[in-house]
Image (cartoon, rainbow, N blue to C red):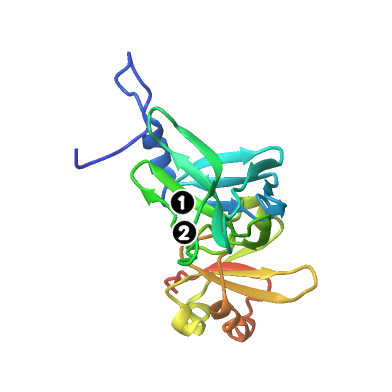
Amino acid sequence: MAILYGFFDSIEGDRLYSAEDLTGYFLRLIPSGVLAGGLEVTASGLTVSVSKGRGFLRTRWVNVTEPETLEVAACTSGVRQDRVVLRLNTLDAVRSISLAVKQGTPPPDYAPPALTRNGPVYEISLARLIVGTESVLSVIDEREDNDLCGIVQGFDAFDGMRFKRLTRAEYDALGSYSNLVLYVVEETNGDITAYIGTSRLGGGGVEGLAVVSSLNTSGLNGEIGTATREDS
């Protein structure tokens, strides 16, 4: 069928929807990742602990309500790079989201494991582990890496902030950034930080900081605006 649509009341079972129907509706709205501050990985010996937190994997949600512990296999010689992943598996026999330690390639290759993102399995990485013969030597947080995981902000991140539709002059003042979605956040200490992102709420980087002066000139201090143009 070339046209997909929904949702409608079912009359005698003629409108039955699957989980895929529901999650597909949100696929372009909710990116995969974890909510800020949650699902932090720490290590002690050959045991890792994942703190409480929430995440989304292809619009499926997971809520870790209590810290979880996972065992890490020791490296037989030298060091090895493993990853702590959240794994979505949509196979009918599984249908779950789970935490797992994914082993990397042993020496001499010393390569971290690739994330599986095909078919029914989709993984995001919470942290990379440097594993020795007796303990986890180091934990490298990967939650903020958009390619491996990413931080997803809930709508409560915008509580108390003002929204403003940009005028034509304000839109033009953004120059080369005018085709992106713009978020300007006023911190409690009065500092203005600009974030640029096209798919992830709260995404940003150096590019965002570069337009702060332009925003201030345009009178957008402390505002959140979408870079859309008004007709007049």
Tell me what residue is drawn at x 62 percent, y 45 percent.
54
Q: Quadrant of residue 157?
A: bottom right
Q: Viewer-proximal residue, 1 or 112?
A: 112
Q: Which mark is residue 29?
A: 1
Is 104 on the left-hand or right-hand side of 17?
right
Q: Viewer-proximal residue, 222 or 138?
A: 138
Q: Secondary structure at mark 1?
A: loop
10 Å neighbourhood of mark 2: few (<14), some, or many (≥20)? some
Between marks 2 and 1, how big is the CA–CA gap? 35 Å
> Extreme right residue here?
189
Q: Which residue is mark 2?
A: 105
Q: Which mark is residue 69?
A: none
Tell me what residue is drawn at x 38 percent, y 24 percent.
9
Q: Is residue 220 visible?
A: yes
Q: Viewer-proximal residue, 175 or 26?
A: 26
Q: Quadrant of residue 66?
A: top right
Is 123 on the left-hand or right-hand side of 163?
left
* Looking at the image, residue 75 lies above or below residue 7: below
What amino acid is found at the position of numbered circle 1 in the picture?
Leu
Tell me what residue is drawn at x 68 percent, y 71 percent.
222
- The percent position of residue 162, horizontal first and vertical second, equals 66, 63
> Extreme front residue here?
77
> Extreme top residue here?
12
What amino acid is found at the position of numbered circle 2 in the picture?
Thr
Q: Is residue 30 visible?
A: no
Q: Nearer the viewer, mark 2 or mark 1?
A: 2
Q: Viewer-proximal residue, 57 or 215?
A: 57
